Image: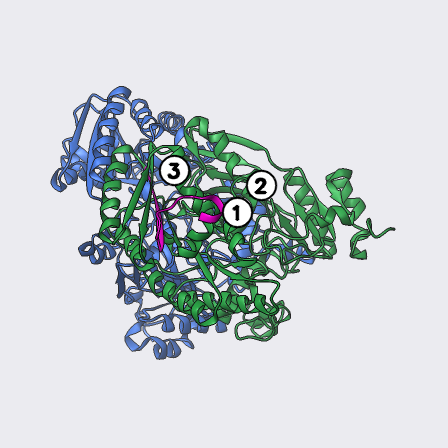
Chain colours: A blue, B green
């Protein structure tokens, strides 16, 4: 067998014919060149060639694949569109990569019950496209929404700029067909919003592929607002901008989005897309208001007044789509734009209580000054979800490692201020060894109880989400083995 | 030992001294007369004397009690204020009843982060009382909110009239300190709204005491609305009222509450509290709107127009608290009022997709006509949560049983129409044998996976929530033993 067709793990060879029976000949990829396409997700510095790739087209096929994996103790990794930023879909070299990209039917737009039933490979924005003619949209809006899959959104509990008002993916999922790691097809919830008994939808959304694969997803749809207004306000300092955010929320206004950019992020965006933000701004705030016209008009006046009161030196208001797009252009291009002012960068993702934002931003500035490593800040200010961009030159020896240190220190700042190590990108491989900084041994063991209940053999997206000594070395809070309760002598209690 | 002091189960005798060490001498009740106080919750036809009652004052005491139970394989049942309506807090005769009524400190009202930290015994309405001076309230409002405990709300994922707009308990819980059935004290979530990894808060809220006991609860607070308007609209038929509900939602208006009563419920309320609803109404709709004044005014005009268009013959609007109270008086007294027109009744609780309401209400009317058993309807129309009151005379032999049959048939109607067997009262003992009508064996086994992960010994509120053959007889979907995966030969997979 030539290098181009060899399956990495010989143990998988025996499974290939059965996988072909299940998914059809063109639903199983074994060629190295084909498999290479899937070797990373959006976090491209983690790479690993999948043992074999399957492209099922139905929930029954997914169930049959997972049953086969379960029978043979073979690991599997679910993957949607591969836009994730925590290497949650990093393939297993000796496992099966289950790609949902061929499951992209929108099964139903149920206007009366304000919900959509879709397959996991459907792109996030395609739900909104299908619902828009009926006056509805799908609210969670990760920045990759044009391409990212709803199944991936479910796995990561994805957020977006408008989750301040409308909540994360978990707040919109009403029903799930799920294949468990044992290959059982289970239905959770349905079209009615009320669940009872265990809310396994809550546990499944955000479980990063460790509890199984969602094969059919029912999401609530949100009424398209009567009016939307976007406001851009410029400040001479981040402190002043932060004060405006606090004042807006304290006044009882709940904007659909409150985004903030610092001087370095503005500079990058300006160079990249000439977004024409107010000259001399050390901070810009983008505030979006939506709802009934009467409400939006009243709130707009209030927000303008509060921004001015906090020290804004210029505020612009956009009322049509074209003007709105111009305001959002700088914000939406900021991540990519940073690539023009720095050869390389790390996108960090952490959360702090909104009230801690000013302190944490000052501490990040101090960290940047003392380390000599630039940090640009672009973030969801309304819900305290930071996205610091840690800049470095990857041609300079050791620069990447120093940037990693600063990036990690920012997470410690988040934890110290009562926040968390990820807001919307997930844990995946990227932050698995950071978990013990945030959770104690009992907390991690409780998470593990749930994981092992669904996946005792440890075949569902292994080495993601929860730390082990093999992954992270001996640390306080890292489980000693794959069955901590047995290893730690507590098994008798159970 | 006299009857009045004898502990029912001798096996518990050995534990009493240790429980007294943990909870103090006055924190352990063994007298029969004292224990009798706790023999039922709000569903009073289920009664059982607890083996022993403990009244811990701290999370550490709860942990020590549960550790003791775990060591001795003794069952425990958590209880809040005992207002539940599914016998979820029915005591175990050979177990420990863990009552949280002495844990009623409001630890913190954190206005900046819009949340409250409370102990589980705090009454629901007391959070709102503490938050009100700051311009906030706690949104979930079960009708028992004056007395029901937040811990009980968490166990049952309680709703209320205003959950249409604001969501259930699970949508408001941000953080939990939980004692697991093994006696471990675990912290889930915190003050930041964003969780990551497994959303065990989602799984714990609504778990009816089967996954442990919450000892500290962080809930989000909601801004008191600038304006609230309540509207009462009367119709000549339930169909017309139902049409109005559909039209309101279809118009994109999201009221904070949409309640509906039928002729029999109106008649009962009229006799009991002389609520003075419009004469000749076959249905009344109560619609509450809240939010910024500008929005509420615009929506009020729209709702009045839609009610009129659907055939309302009279609409009243209340703008001050006194007028609002008058409108709500009939609705809030309806359950108790039915006691004046019928010697006994069953309060049923089921959910249907809102669009199925007219069909289901017509089917309930047909069921009532064919069985000769009266059914009064008082319900949360906006989210399809029915509360049919099945009336009967308990002095008449067999009448109770016939009412049970009608009550059960109503649940079947809910299931047939894509709904569920409980909206907000929970499963408890009351509906445990109804679960297989709604869930298949794989679904129930998946629920059981989670339960057994936390509680392998089966000591946490046993015989509630999930059916067993001992409880329900052999039915399709009922687990064959307490460890179904072992019993059904699937253990090797795990």
- Name the element at disc 2: loop
Chain letter for mark 1: B
Mark 2 closeness class: few <14, some 14–19, many ≥20 residues within 10 Å? many
Can you tell which quarter of the image residue B58 is in? top right
Q: Is residue B279 above or below residue A456?
A: above
What is the CA distance from the residue labelled 1 to the residue labelled 2?
9 Å
| Quadrant containing the N terminus of chain A in the rendered view | bottom left
Residue B50 in the figure: left or right of residue A358: right
Can I make out residue A169 in this image? Answer: yes
Asked if badge 1 and badge 2 are on a common chain, one would say yes
Do discs 2 and 3 share a chain?
yes
Residue highlighted by disc 3: B324
**Residue to which mark 2 is pinned:** B120
Of A412 and A445, which appears nearest the observer? Answer: A445
Q: Nearer the viewer, residue A470 or A270?
A: A270
Q: Earlier in the sequence, mark 3 or mark 1?
A: 1
């Amino acid at each position: 067998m030539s290098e181009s067709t060899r399956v990495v793990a010989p143990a998988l060879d025996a499974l290939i014919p059965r996988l072909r029976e299940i998914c059809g000949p063109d639903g199983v990829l074994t060629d190295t060149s084909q498999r290479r396409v899937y070797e990373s997700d959006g976090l491209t510095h983690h790479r690993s060639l999948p043992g074999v790739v399957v492209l099922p087209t139905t929930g029954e096929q997914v169930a049959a694949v997972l049953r086969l994996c379960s029978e043979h103790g073979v690991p599997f990794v679910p993957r949607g569109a591969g836009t994730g930023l925590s290497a949650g879909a990093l393939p297993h070299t000796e496992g099966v990569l289950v790609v949902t990209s061929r499951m992209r039917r929108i099964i139903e737009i149920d206007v009366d019950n304000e919900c959509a039933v879709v397959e996991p490979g459907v792109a996030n924005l395609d739900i909104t496209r299908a619902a828009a003619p009926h006056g509805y949209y799908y609210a969670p809006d990760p920045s990759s929404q044009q391409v990212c899959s709803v199944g991936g959104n479910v796995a990561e509990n994805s957020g977006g700029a408008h989750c301040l008002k409308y909540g994360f993916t978990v707040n919109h999922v009403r029903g799930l067909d799920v294949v468990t790691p044992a290959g059982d097809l289970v239905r959770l919830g349905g079209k009615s919003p009320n669940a009872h008994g265990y809310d396994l939808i809550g546990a499944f959304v955000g479980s990063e592929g460790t509890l199984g694969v969602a094969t059919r997803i029912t999401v609530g749809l949100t009424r398209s607002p009567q009016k939307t207004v976007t406001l851009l306000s410029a400040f001479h300092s981040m402190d002043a901008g932060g004060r405006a955010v606090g004042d807006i929320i304290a006044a009882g206004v709940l904007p659909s989005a409150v985004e903030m950019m610092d001087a370095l992020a503005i500079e990058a965006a300006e160079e990249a897309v000439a977004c024409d933000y107010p000259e001399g701004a050390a901070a810009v705030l983008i505030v979006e208001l939506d709802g009934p016209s009467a409400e939006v008009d009243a709130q707009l006046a209030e927000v303008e007044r509060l921004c001015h009161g906090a020290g804004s030196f210029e505020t612009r208001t956009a009322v049509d789509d074209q003007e709105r797009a111009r305001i959002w252009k700088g914000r939406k291009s900021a991540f990519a734009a940073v690539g023009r002012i720095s050869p390389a960068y790390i996108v960090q993702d952490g959360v702090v209580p909104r009230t801690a934002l000013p302190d944490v931003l000052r501490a990040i500035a101090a960290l940047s000054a003392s380390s000599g490593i630039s940090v640009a800040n672009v973030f969801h200010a309304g819900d305290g979800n930071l996205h610091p961009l840690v800049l470095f030159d990857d041609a300079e020896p050791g620069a990447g490692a120093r940037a990693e240190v600063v990036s990690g220190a920012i997470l410690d700042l988040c934890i110290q201020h009562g926040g968390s190590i990820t807001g919307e990108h997930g844990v995946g491989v990227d932050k698995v060894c950071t978990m013990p900084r945030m959770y104690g041994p009992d907390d991690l063991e409780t998470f593990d109880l749930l994981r092992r209940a669904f996946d005792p053999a440890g075949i569902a997206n292994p080495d993601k989400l929860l730390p082990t000594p093999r992954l992270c070395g001996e640390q306080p809070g890292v489980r000693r083995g794959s069955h901590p309760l047995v290893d730690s002598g507590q098994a008798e209690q159970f």
